Image: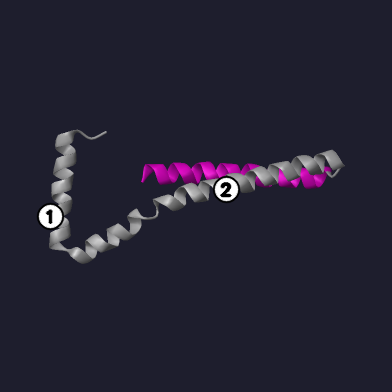
């Protein structure tokens, strides 16, 4: 968490950069609006992983062991990929 002094300094720098190069400021404003898609993306990934896991369990209950194993591996790989992607986005 930044202190009030640091936030004020960052706001001052941002204002100076915006006045020096308005086109660059517009480029950064375009990226700020994409935060809403992060939540939507997480919900979609979670839904897809949940459906795949449920289909895997249904296949296992039906006696389709190989299909269940394949779907379980896909679910696991998707969950691992989602975790690493989430961590990578948090670090940047």
Between the C-alphas of marks 1 and 2, the distance is 40 Å
> In terms of secondary structure, where does tag 1 sit?
helix
Q: Position of residue 48 (x, y in %)?
A: 63, 48
Left or right: residue 8 versus residue 47 is left
Mark found first going from the N terminus, 1 or 2:
1
- Residue that carries the numbered disc 1 in the rendered image: 16
- Residue that carries the numbered disc 2 in the rendered image: 45
Left or right: residue 73 versus residue 6 is right
Magenta stretch secondary structure, dominant: helix
Q: Position of residue 68 (x, y in %)?
A: 77, 43
Above or below 14: residue 19: below
Residue under the image location 17 percent in, 58 percent down: 18
In the image, the segment drawn in magenta is 65-92
Left or right: residue 30 versus residue 4 is right
Sort mark 1 into few (<14), some (14-19) or many (20+) by Cα contacts within 10 Å: few
Residue under the image location 40 percent in, 42 percent down: 90
Outermost residue to the bottom: 23
Residue under the image location 12 percent in, 55 percent down: 16
Query: Do tag 1 and tag 2 residues touch (Cβ < 8 Å)?
Result: no
Left or right: residue 7 versus residue 46 is left
Residue under the image location 22 percent in, 66 percent down: 23
């Amino acid at each position: 968490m930044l202190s009030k002094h640091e936030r004020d300094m960052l706001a001052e720098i941002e204002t100076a950069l915006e006045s020096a190069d308005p086109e660059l400021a517009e480029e950064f404003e375009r990226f700020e609006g994409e935060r809403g898609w992060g939540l939507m993306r997480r919900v979609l990934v979670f839904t897809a992983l949940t459906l795949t896991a449920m289909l895997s369990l249904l296949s296992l209950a039906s006696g389709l062991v190989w299909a269940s194993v394949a779907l379980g591996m896909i679910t696991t790989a998707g969950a691992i990929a989602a975790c690493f992607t989430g961590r990578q986005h948090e670090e940047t």
